[in-house]
Amino acid sequence: MFVEVSSLSDDIIFLQNSCFMAYMEKHKLDNVSAAQVFQAYSLFSYIREHYEYLHLMGVDYIVKHLDGIVGGS
């Protein structure tokens, strides 16, 4: 059981990081600016809370979805 939880945590962190990096690239943001957006809108928490659904989608889809949360284009 411990291995499964650890593995799931690693998978969630990997998805959060992948989405963060893709968001930075799409919006041409540095890591500090992107982190401010992710913190202001609780996007890391959102990805963690909705991991079961989001991990089935591609990172590009998730970034578009996060844009909808932020109100971006």
Image (tube, rainbow, N blue to C red):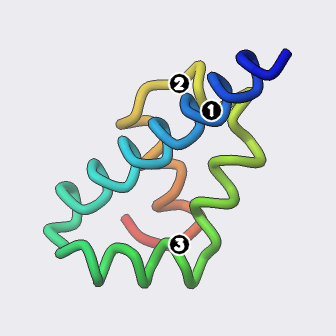
Separation of residues labelled 3 and 1 (CA atoms): 17 Å
Looking at the image, do the residues carrying marks 3 and 2 touch, with CB atoms under 8 Å apart? no
Separation of residues labelled 1 and 2 (CA atoms): 5 Å
Q: Is residue 15 left or right of residue 25?
A: right
Q: Which residue is mark 2?
A: 57
Looking at the image, do the residues carrying marks 1 and 2 touch, with CB atoms under 8 Å apart? yes
Q: Residue visible at 14% across and 68% down?
A: 28
Q: Which residue is mark 3?
A: 70
Residue 52 place in picture, x, y as percent: 74, 27
Q: Residue visible at 45% across and 37% down?
A: 14
Q: Residue visible at 43% across and 26% down?
A: 58
Residue 43 place in picture, x, y as percent: 58, 63
Q: Residue visible at 32% across and 57% down?
A: 23
Q: Which residue is mark 1?
A: 54
Of labels 3 and 1, earlier in sequence is: 1
Mark 2: which secondary structure?
loop
Q: Is residue 21 left or right of residue 4?
A: left
Residue 62 place in picture, x, y as percent: 49, 41
- In the rendered structure, which amino acid carries the disc numbered 3? Val
